[in-house]
Image (cartoon, helix red, strand yellow):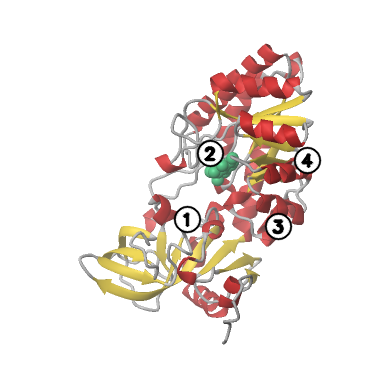
Amino acid sequence: MATSEIKHPLLPFVADDGAMEELAQQYGTPVYVYDGEQLLSNLTHLDNALSSAFSLYQICFALKANTNPHLLSLMKESLPTLGADCSSPGELYIADEVGIDRERRIYTGNYESTEELKLAIESAEHLNLDDITSYERLSRIAVPKQISFRLNPGFGSGSFPEVVTAGKEAKFGIPEEKIVNAYRLAQKDGVKSFGIQCMSGSGNLDSDYFVHLLTAILENARRLEKKLGFSFSFISLGGGYGVPYENDQEPLDLDDLFGKLGKTFHEFYNPANGPVPKFMIEPGKIIIADAGFLLTRVTGIKESYKNFVGLDAGMNTFLRPALYKTYHKIFKVGEPDAPEGLVADFTGGICENTDRLATDRSFPEVEEGDLVAVMDVGAYGFSMANQYNTRPKPAEVLIENGKSHLIRRRETMEDIFSHTDWNGSKNG
Ligand SMILES: Cc1ncc(COP(=O)(O)O)c(C=O)c1O
C-alpha cells in the first residue's frame, strides 16, 4: 500500500516500532491499546455538533460497545452530561459504578425477564421496551412514570445485513401499525410521560439515511400524539453512526449530519408552537471505535493452499471478523507503509476455521515475532472478547499524555476458574 493511501488517526502510534515493542514487553500481547486523546476528541466533536443543532439533547453512550470503567469515567469527567444506553443488568451496574446519572440512562432490552425489568425500572429513568408483552410484564411489577417503545419502521440499514436491526427480518422493535396499542395500554394504566426510540442498524455512513430515518420516527411520533392526545418528552434516534473501517470510506461529517437532523427535527417540533421533546442518541462506534487498536504478535507463518499469518490474537480476542466478516485495517508495526509482498489470511490459535482477523489481505512481508496492529477495535472489541478454548481475555492499556497505564489486567487461568466447584479435584 502506498503511504498516501494509509489513513488512520492512530497511525503515529503503530508506526513507532520502539514504543510498540516497549508496550508489548511491558503488558504482553495480545493487548487492547486506547488513545485517551482520540476518545475525548471524538466525544467533544460529537457534543459540539449536537449542541449547535439542538437546545435539548442527550448523548447516551452505548455501553455495549465498551464498558471499561477507566474509559467510561474519563469520558464522564470530560463530558459530565454523558448518559448511557444500557441493554443488560451488567451495563446498568457499570453505569451506576462510574456515576452516570440515573436521569441520563436509557434501558433498551429485549425479551427481558421479570427480574431484569425490575432492575431496569429502578436503575434507568428512560425505559424503552421492545414489545407490548414486555410492558405487560413490567406493569405487573409497577406502572412506570415514563415509558418508551422501540419502533420498527419496516426498514433498516447497516453496513452489512447482520447489523441491520429494523425491517421485516429484525427481531427488534414494534411495527408501526402495532405500536399504538402499546402506548394506549400504558396510557390506560395512567402513564403520563412518553418517549419513542428507534435503532435501525449499525455502521451507517450516509447522512441522508439518518434524515430519512428521523423523518419516519417523527411522522410516527406525530401520528401517535394526534391519536392519543399526549406529547412525547423524548425522541431517540438510537446509534448506528458509522466509522470508516475500510480504506475507501469517508467519515461522517458530524456537523453536517446533526445540522440536517436538527433542521428536520425542528420542522416537526418548533419551539414557537409548543413543547419540544428532548432529542437523544445512543452512539457507540462513532465515539470509541477508532480510539483503540489491538497489538498482537505473529506466532507462526504457514504456506498451505493459501498463506496464513498466525497471531496470538484470534476470534476469542476480537470476534467481529469471524462473526460478521468485517474488514479491519491491519498495519505492520514500525512499517505500516512497507510494500506489500504477501497475500494471507490472519488467524489466531483457536480451533475453529472461522478464526480469522482478515482474509486474503495484501500485506508487507512479516516474520515470527513481528508486531501487527488491528485497527478500530475500540467498539465491540474487548466487549465481545471471550474465553473460548479456555484462553484468558487480554489486557487493556490506555495511553494518556504520552504515558501508558494498565486499565484492565490480563485474565489468568485462575480467574477463569475462580467461581467453579472443583469437586475436590483441584491440585488433587
Ligand atoms: C439499542 C442500541 N442503541 C445503540 C447501539 C449502538 O450502535 P453503534 O455502536 O452502531 O452506534 C446499539 C448497537 O447495536 C443498539 O442496539
Q: Considering the numbered disc 2 on the image, is that residue within a helix, a strand or a loop?
A: loop
- Amino acid at circle 4: Glu
In this picture, residue 70 sits left or right of residue 38: right
Going from N to C along the chain, the mark reached first, 3 or 1, is: 1
In this picture, residue 174 sits left or right of residue 328: right
Residue matched to label 3? 74
Residue 103: numbered disc = 4
Which residue is more in the foreground, 115 or 284?
115
Q: Is residue 245 above or below residue 408?
A: above
Q: Quadrant of residue 352?
A: bottom left
Residue 343 rendering spot, x and y as whole percentages: 27, 63
Going from N to C along the chain, the mark reached first, 1 or 2, is: 1
Residue 383 rendering spot, x and y as whole percentages: 56, 57
Task: Choose mark 4 or mark 3, whichever is in front.
Answer: 4
Residue matched to label 1? 8
Mark 1 lies within 8 Å of ligand 1 (Cβ measured): no
Instruction: Measure how far apart labels 3 and 1 are at the Cα level.
Output: 22 Å
- Amino acid at circle 2: Asp
